[in-house]
Image (spheres, helix red, strand yellow):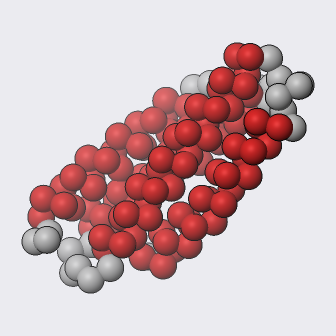
Amino acid sequence: MIKVFLMFAAMNGALAVVLGAFGAHALKQSLSATALQTWHTAVQYHFVHVLALLAVGLLLKGTSLLVPGKIAGIAFILGMLLFSGSLYGLALGGPKLLGPITPLGGLCFIVGWVALAVHIWRVPL
């Protein structure tokens, strides 16, 4: 599971950079200011949670207590997919059905941060 978290973080770090550059260059002329702001928000949250997932993977390495950390990692992955993914889709003109998915991704991020706090609290550092 640790390797999955670290690999997902590494690959999504690259993806966040690519999507950020794509938004700044390729989409700049074709999207409205609101859509570009939505794209930027998606990239920002995507990248922040890539770093959080990387931290989770590194924290899990060398500890026997894995459950809260695993929950944090899974929640961050789901959050990236649901929150950032839905915002990318909405910015590109996807169906309005994506709108209600965004808060679910945000909830996943919150669960991830709380689980990470529990993990840090329980593990002797």
Quarter of the image for the N terminus: give it: bottom left
The x and y percentages for residue 44 are: 55, 39
The residue at the point 37 percent across, 63 percent down is 55
Q: In this view, does 44 lie above or below 125?
A: above
**Snapshot quadrant of residue 90:** top right
Q: In this view, does 34 lie above or below 3?
A: above
The x and y percentages for residue 76 are: 45, 52
Q: Can residue 65 be seen in this snapshot?
A: yes
The x and y percentages for residue 47 are: 54, 49
Q: Is residue 29 left or right of residue 102?
A: right
**Snapshot quadrant of residue 65:** bottom left
Q: In this view, does 59 lie above or below 23?
A: below
Q: Can residue 94 be seen in this snapshot?
A: no
The x and y percentages for residue 72 are: 35, 57
Q: In this view, does 117 lie to the left or right of 124?
A: right
**Snapshot quadrant of residue 66:** bottom left
The residue at the point 88 percent across, 25 percent down is 29
Nearer-the-camera pick, 32 or 77:
32
The residue at the point 12 percent across, 59 percent down is 121
